[in-house]
């Protein structure tokens, strides 16, 4: 049985999920291959946000996290589906090794040698060489293996196209796909970083955004004033 549906959620399935959430229940969904390493796992939909603001507007609870996903990352799980589980490893049975035969060395008594007087000359260099060879070699001390620590955790705060996004990865595994956060939340995170250059860059970004927002608000006020004047003329004419 296939673990995922590459088509993602259809319009009818999304409407069914919306109705289920309105009834106070949280429907289950299965992650497709486009969701990455969690493909085949089961989650619960807790909220549907505005699809006009982001492509990832289906909020799914997976474990202790609630993350936004695109409808193409999800599908309706088949009946009885419980998600993928790691298959237990089967340890090979130990192979009995037959005991090796025991060897014993038996020394026969050597008769005492005859008394002989031998006069020889020994070179001092030979004596030094024999003493050097007789010294036992030092044994190599094996260093204890260091335990492998957990994979590194990376939390990324980014700004692009007028939006702040936050994401997290551990090693090569994506813990949280980049999702949009409010500027106020981004400023709180940046305030924890004691780097003047970062603060100046963020302040410049916020200044530009405020200026653009003020210009847009002024334009909307002017358009509203024209509409109200036009409406007053129509009322007077009526």
Image (tube, helix red, strand yellow):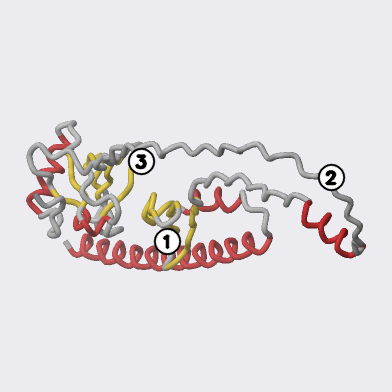
Residue 61: tell me if it is visible.
Answer: no
Q: Which residue is under mark 3?
A: 65
Describe the element under mark 3 as helix, strand or loop. Answer: strand
Q: CA distance from mark 3 to mark 1?
A: 22 Å
Judged left or right of residue 81, residue 61 is right
Q: Find residue 120 and report its image quarter.
A: bottom right
Q: Earlier in the sequence, mark 1 or mark 2?
A: 2
Front: mark 2 or 3: 2
Tell which of 94 and 230 is nearer to you: 94
Secondary structure beneath label 2 = loop
- Residue located 33% across and 42% down the image: 66
Locate residue 24: give its quadrant. Answer: top left
Q: Find residue 204 and report its horizontal and vertical position in percent.
A: 58, 66
N-terminal-most mark, 2 or 3: 3
**Which residue in the structure is indicated by mark 1?**
163
In the picture of the structure, the residue carrying the numbered disc 2 is 115
Q: Does any portion of residue 18 appear in the rendered image? A: yes
Q: Residue at x 42, y 52 (%)?
A: 181
Q: Which mark is residue 78?
A: none
Please tell me whether residue 17 is drawn above or below residue 156 in the rendered image: above
Rendered location of residue 206, percent (x, y): 54, 61
């Amino acid at each position: 049985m296939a673990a995922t549906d590459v088509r993602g959620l259809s319009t009818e399935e999304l409407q069914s999920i919306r109705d289920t959430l309105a009834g106070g229940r949280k429907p289950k969904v299965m992650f497709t291959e486009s969701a990455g390493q969690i493909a085949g796992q089961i989650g619960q939909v807790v909220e549907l946000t505005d699809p006009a603001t982001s492509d990832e507007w289906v909020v799914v609870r997976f474990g202790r996290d609630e993350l936004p996903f695109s409808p193409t990352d999800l599908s309706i799980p088949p009946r009885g589906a419980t998600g993928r589980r790691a298959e237990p490893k089967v340890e090979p049975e130990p192979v009995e090794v037959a005991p090796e035969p025991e060897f014993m060395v038996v020394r026969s008594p050597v008769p005492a040698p005859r008394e002989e007087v031998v006069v020889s000359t020994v070179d001092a260099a030979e004596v030094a060489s024999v003493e050097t060879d007789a010294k036992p070699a030092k044994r190599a001390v094996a260093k204890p293996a260091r335990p492998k620590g957990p994979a590194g955790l990376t939390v990324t705060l980014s700004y692009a196209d007028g939006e702040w996004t936050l994401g997290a990865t551990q090693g090569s595994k994506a813990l949280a796909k980049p999702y949009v956060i409010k500027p106020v939340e981004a400023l709180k995170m940046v305030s924890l970083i004691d780097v003047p250059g970062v603060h100046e860059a963020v302040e410049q970004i916020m200044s530009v955004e405020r200026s653009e927002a003020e210009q847009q608000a002024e334009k909307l006020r002017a358009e509203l004033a024209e509409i109200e004047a036009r409406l007053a003329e129509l009322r007077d004419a009526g």
